[in-house]
Image (cartoon, rainbow, N blue to C red):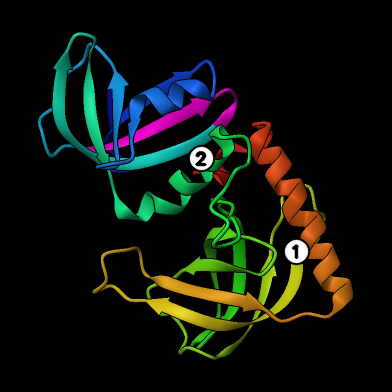
Amino acid sequence: MVYDESVGAVRLELRLGSQAEWIKIFDPRDWTVFVPTPERAENGSTVHIDLDVGGWLVTLRGAVVGQRESPAGLVVALGGAERDKINYLNGFVRGGLLNLREKRRLPIRLQVTYGAIEGPATTFTKDINEEGLFLFTDKPLPETSQIHMLVTVPGKPQPLSLMGKVSHTIVKQDDEAPGMGVVFECDDSQRQELVSIVRDLEAQLNDGKLPVNVVE
């Protein structure tokens, strides 16, 4: 366990040998994760957990809410902003049995340049699927705004040029990270390309083949 000054948080490594081990350490009733470690940290300490589930890499953020003696470790409550990662991770652990009420959203970080009010702006995605994505920004565009985006995809020589419409926004005053959800507006040909790209990203995510900074 180390304190990472760059993020202002304790950083823990959690490597699980199999997907089944995640079920044993995650409590869906209160969204806590048990991290085996001989180290101690004060309750309330901010924590970043670098989680490796059989090669599936993701960083989870939360706060220490308890200690255990046998086995020794820390109990970490995950923040609300980690919801999409956990939902996807739970589906991944169950072998793809995701919540059928909504399409799964891949919790990956892709660089995006888009037309902001002040001019071109560069940010990153919180998640993406075949129908849209969520962009981090302190200054989201008004809902229903048309938006042009250049999305950088690992392994692609050129960014994807996509049009979309802002479907919802989250501002600083909300409990989650500010940003905006965007629904893609594209023809059948581009839609097929998006489906292929998202499926490829999902396969790389599940196989642990995406760059670490993409799944942060």
The x and y percentages for residue 166 are 54, 83
- Estimate the x, y position of residue 55 in percent, counting from the top left: 60, 25
Q: Which element is circle 2 on?
A: helix
Residue 106 falls inside the magenta stretch: no
Front-most of residues 92 and 141: 92
Q: Which residue lies at the image location 53% right of the left edge and 53% below the top edge?
A: 99
Left-right relation of 179 to 119? left
Disc sitting over residue 6 in the figure? none
First in residue order: circle 1 vs circle 2: 2
Tell me the quarter of the image containing the N terminus: top left
- Quarter holding residue 7: top left
Q: In the rendering, at what x and y percent does residue 5 appear? A: 27, 37
Q: Seen from this angle, which residue lies furthest right?
A: 189
Q: Position of residue 129 (x, y in %)?
A: 64, 61
- Give the residue at x 68% y 31%: 207
What residue sits right under mark 1 in the picture? 159
Majority secondary structure of magenta residues? strand
- Classed neighbour count for the residue bearing mark 2: other residues with Cα under 10 Å, few (<14), some (14–19), many (≥20): many
- Please state which amino acid type lies under the numbered disc 2: Leu
For label 1, the crowd category at 10 Å Cα-Cα, with few meaning under 14, some 14 to 19 and many 20 or more, is some
Total tally of numbered discs in the picture: 2
Residue 13 image-quadrant placement:
top left
Which element carries disc 1, helix, strand or loop? loop
Question: Which residue type does callout 1 highlight?
Answer: Pro
Residue linked to disc 2:
89
The residue stretch that appears in magenta: 46-56
Up-down: is 121 above or below 67?
below
13 to 85, vertically: above or below? above
